[in-house]
Each structure stands twice: as structure tokens, then as C-alpha cells.
Amino acid sequence: MGVENRARLPGEFELIRKYFAPLAAGAPGSLALEDDACTYRPPDDTELVLTADALIEGRHYLADDPADLVARKMLRVNLSDLAAKGAKPVGYLMTMALGPAIDEAWIAAFTSGLAHDQKEFDIPLMGGDTVATPGPTSLSVTALGVVPVGRALRRTTAAPGDRLYVSGTIGDGVLGLRVLRRELPGLTRSHAEALADRYHLPQPRLALGRALLDGNLARASMDVSDGLVGDAVHIAEASRCGLVIHADRVPLSAAAEQALADDLELLPTILSGGDDYELLFTAPVEAAPKIARLAANLSLPITEIGEVTNRTGVTVLDRDGVEIRMTQGGFQHF
Amino acid sequence: MGVENRARLPGEFELIRKYFAPLAAGAPGSLALEDDACTYRPPDDTELVLTADALIEGRHYLADDPADLVARKMLRVNLSDLAAKGAKPVGYLMTMALGPAIDEAWIAAFTSGLAHDQKEFDIPLMGGDTVATPGPTSLSVTALGVVPVGRALRRTTAAPGDRLYVSGTIGDGVLGLRVLRRELPGLTRSHAEALADRYHLPQPRLALGRALLDGNLARASMDVSDGLVGDAVHIAEASRCGLVIHADRVPLSAAAEQALADDLELLPTILSGGDDYELLFTAPVEAAPKIARLAANLSLPITEIGEVTNRTGVTVLDRDGVEIRMTQGGFQHF
């Protein structure tokens, strides 16, 4: 398989040598991508955590998004999945189906973005495949991490009585996308930039995930990628329990606060828009003091936004305790 | 991420529940795909072998190929990579970007093909992601296997003086594709069907790969996917040595023999066409008797087709010892 007959691109092997092999330097088992498989041995007493994601040009990112940011977001989205498990990232494999618009400059920028975040998160490229497609570019990443054996945090293990926590702030990613679409012209420039940055460059909460695992603090955990409420539904369903979210406790950035003050109708978007890449987790009541100390140590807000019940589904309450009704795939604000 | 707004398909979560979760039943760490990551611990004294491949509709398979065969070939191509390393397959992760033509019947047939070969090769689905694309369907698989620590067979380790071997027969895959394109009308029906079968359903040489590793028989090994000569170039380059291939020793099936007898100009196609998924390996001269016994035990032809030299590149000789000249990306027959 190769990128054949593409005047704007070097051949597959030249692409590998020039752009991809340097990214595999930190993975001895990859043999600089000269082989078609990579070997890896997890450290003693650990097991692997594996997660895979697909990204499509025009759907998960825009064709004219800077290629280095597309690459970095792709990695960070997968690292966020590992963070939710409490895993230490090990590396990743990547397949690319390159669309007709891809030229060498795009590859150069994309791989420079990979190199940047590989260094930041200490992960090598471990293998992959590059092919051509007449359709939009299609990217696929399999990320590897390790956890102590049997200790991976799960979304299936929430227990009634647990408190529900979320890290950081919610809604910035989806508002950042609206900023980029010029749909929020009323924001100050610094707020608009802050939101756009959050959309382009999520911060995988790796230190938090590992601390939750190491300290045995979290009962269930996942990362917020589909939207706070939608992902809460995933925890509720996987754990066979119910969740209550107090909408007024959901932590917002100053920029999101301003956007919401300008337009109260943005609340459902903020709560269900996605692209947050914060950790949503449940913990027993007695863990609260330790979680507060952890937040201080990490300089990362961790906010209690609700609780786990022995009912089913997710209930979102407004500040007066009145339910905001959910509909499938999102919810309606009454 | 999901398969949104697709009238012909159930929603992502329904697809997972109905078609994909049953495929993960053999992977306890996948939690029936209710989580977004899978855990896996390699057995003691083993390490992982990881390989990734991308397949594009219309390029690596045809839109009207039977979906169950597309699925099975996709798995087998990846298993062939593991076979070349001497690895025991463990499982796989898969991402799918589904094009507009995909309907539920296609998904049902595709996943039934996966189920069939998962059972045949004893591998579960360990995780993945399903998204929609307006372009052709794009599939990506990351396959996992295990080998004893440090023992994976490599393509980088051929040594001058080694003999060069290939399993099975060469050229059937590419001739099968020509049969399917109705370009070989002169073949008998049984020969045509045999070739088409080889194109649709390669046989990953897992038992051979593991026996080569266990018996310490092979020095370098890879699977023939890009074509015998092209892949020989990969071994030569990765091992910094030269290879000589005697074209008249290359093993052909009865069907390929007939096709070649009908049209001698098919020789370059056979030698460089690809889609063989046989193992190409080098071994010290003294391993020959053990390799012959292994071929008998496995009921699989293993043919010595050439040797490793201390020069560079790949030289193909005809039956008179005259060189058949190579050109980039294939070769010319003089």
C-alpha cells in the first residue's frame, strides 16, 4: 500500500524516511519504521490500556485548520482517553488516508505538530501506515498507555452515594468552535482567543488521572469528549445507576461566563457541546478533602457538580432545583 | 464522535450494541466496549508486536466486494504481518470511517466476516471507533500479537550467505485480481476460481512464522504484500545487504503456471504484483534440512529461491542466469 501517483507528495518510503522515521526515534522496538511492526514490553506489574479514534477532515477538523494543530489535537484527544483511565502514555500508532489536497507542506506542518506534542508528553510514534484516498483525509490513532495491573479507572464503576466531579472548566471547546465560525462576535478579543485555543488544543488531564488512580480516589472516570451531559449518560448507563448534575455548579471559564451572560440560551450548548477533554469522575463522599488537596497540588480546579443515585439516567437541575429536560442526543432547555 | 444523521444506519451506540459488542466478547479488558479503552496484559516473558494498516474502498478493495470477505481479508492482511514476526495473535482494534453507501446490511455482513475469522484465528475485537465520512469508506486496523521477549523476527537481520526462502506460491493474488477484472478469460474455471479465492482470502502463515521463531530457523523474515521483488528490496535495504532471486525457482500454483503458459509476459506481474501474503525469509545454509522437515510437517511448500549477498539491491536472474533488470516500483522484462 502506498501513496501512488501523487505529484504533490514524495513517495511513501521517502515520506517515511523524511517525516515519520524521526518521530519513531523514541521507540526502539519500531526500528525507525524500517520494519512493519513494533515490539513493546510493558513494565513489570503493569498492563496496557489501548484506545483508538478516527478523525475525518471536514467533520472532526476543518480542511484549513493549521496542520500542526490538527496533529496535536489528534494526539491530545487520545491522551485524554488514557488520562481518564489513570494511564501513563506509552506511544501511538497512526494510519493516514491522505486526501487529494494534501501536499508536502501539510505533511511537514502535521509532523512538526506531532513532534512538538510527542516531546511534551514523552511519547513516540510506534508504527503506522500511509495511503491515498480520493475522499477527505482520514486519520486513525491507536494510543497505548500502562496502568498497574487491574487498576485502570473505568466508567462502569460509579456507585450510588458517590459525588460527581469534573476538572477544569466546561463549554470552552464548543464555544471556541463558535468563535472560529464567527458566531460569537460580542466577546472580547482575549476571551475569544482563549476559547479558540481551548478548541484547538485540549489539555489531557494526565496528572489528574494518575493521581486519582494512585490515591485510590475515583470510583468511576471518563473524559468529557461528547459533552458533559452526554458523557454523564455514558457513566450512568455503564454503571447501571443515575446521575444528578447541578447546572449552576458546572465550572465555567471567565470567557464562557461572558458568553453566557451575553446569551443565556448558550447554557445547553455549554453543557452538552463536547470537546472539553476534562475528566468527569465519581468518588466516595469521604474522598472530598483529598480531592480538594489534589486540586490545589495540581493547580487545577476540581468541582463537585452532582451525585450518583440508585435511579437511572441523568437529571440536570437548574439553580432552583427544577429539572432541565433531556432529549436524545442533547437536551432541551425549558 | 458518531455516525450522525445517517438514515440508512442505526446510531453509533446501537451499532456498537448490536454488531460490535459481540465481537469483543473474547476480550475481557474491553468490557463489551462499554468503556472507551481496553486493558491487556501480555503473558509473562512475552512482549507485544503491534502493526497497523489502512484500507480504502475502491483502492484496497472494491465497493461491491462482498463485505464479509473485505472484513476477513482486512484481518488476514494484519495477521500476515504478525506471522512474519513469529507472533501469536492477541486481538485487534479497528476504526471505521463509513462512506455514504454503507447501510445496515453491509455492516451486518462485514461484522459476520469479522466474527468468522475471529473464531478461526482466536482473536477478539479489543476496541475502536466508528465515524461517518462523505468520501469512500476508510478502515484502519491495529493488530496485537505476542512473542517471547526479544525474539520477534525482523526484516533487518539478513546476513550474506543466507539462503532466501518463500512459502506457498507467488502471484496468485495479483492474478486473482485480474481474473476478477475479467482480464484472464483463457483460464479454466477451476483455475480462475482458485486465483480469485487467493485474492479474496489470503492465508496468514501464522504456524510457519511461529515455527521459524521457535526453532530459531529464520534470520530475517517479512510477509510478501507489496510483491515478491519489492518486498525483497525491503529486506535488502533494511539488512544492508543484497539478494539474488532465481526467477525459475519461484513457486507457482497450477493456475499461475497455466496463466503464464498462456502469456509469458505475465512473469513480471507474478514476481512483483503483490497480495501474496506468503512469508519471505532468510536462513543460514545449515538450516535447510530443518526447513524441509518443517515444510513437510506444515504441509506447506517452502522453496529456496535465492541467496543473500554482501552487495546491495535485489538481482533477479532468469533460468539462464541472465539478469532481469529492475526499474523503480517494479521491473522490466528484457
Image (tube, coloured by chain):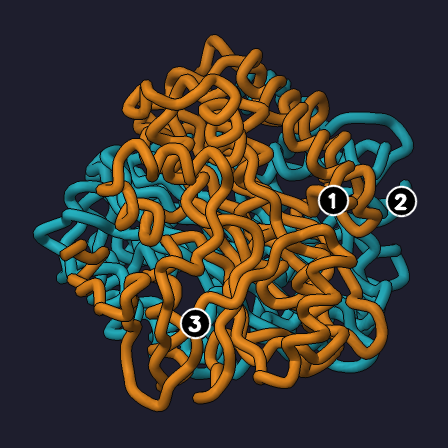
Chain colours: A cyan, B orange
Query: Residue at coordinates 82% horizontally, 26% vertically from top-left?
Result: A312
The CA distance from mark 3 to mark 1 is 32 Å
Question: Which of these two is toward me, A226 or B74?
Answer: B74
Indicate whether A262 appears above or below A29. Answer: above
Do marks 2 and 1 share a subunit?
no
**Residue furthest out toward the top:** B7
Residue type, mark 2 in image: Ala
Q: Residue B38, how many percent across, how many down?
A: 71, 52
Indicate whether B84 appears above or below A323. Answer: below
Residue B306, quarter of the rendered image: bottom left
Residue type, mark 1 in image: Phe
Q: Residues within 10 Å of mark 2 (few under 14, many from 20)?
A: many
**Helix, strand or loop under label 2:** loop
Query: Residue at coordinates 85% horizontally, 47% vertically from top-left?
Result: A157
Do marks 3 and 2 share a subunit?
no
- Chain where mark 1 sits: B
The CA distance from mark 2 to mark 1 is 38 Å
Residue under pointer 2: A159
Which mark is on residue B306? Answer: 3
Residue under pointer 1: B121
Foreground mark, 2 or 1, reads 1
Q: Residue B42, how many percent across, how many down?
A: 78, 67
Q: Residue B101, how many percent across, how many down?
A: 40, 16
- Chain where mark 2 sits: A
- Chain where mark 3 sits: B
Do marks 3 and 1 share a subunit?
yes
**Helix, strand or loop under label 1:** helix
Q: Residues within 10 Å of mark 1 (few under 14, many from 20)?
A: some
**Helix, strand or loop under label 3:** strand
Along the horizontal axis of the image, is A263 left or right of A222? left
Query: Residue at coordinates 66% horizontally, 66% vertically from top-left?
Result: B86
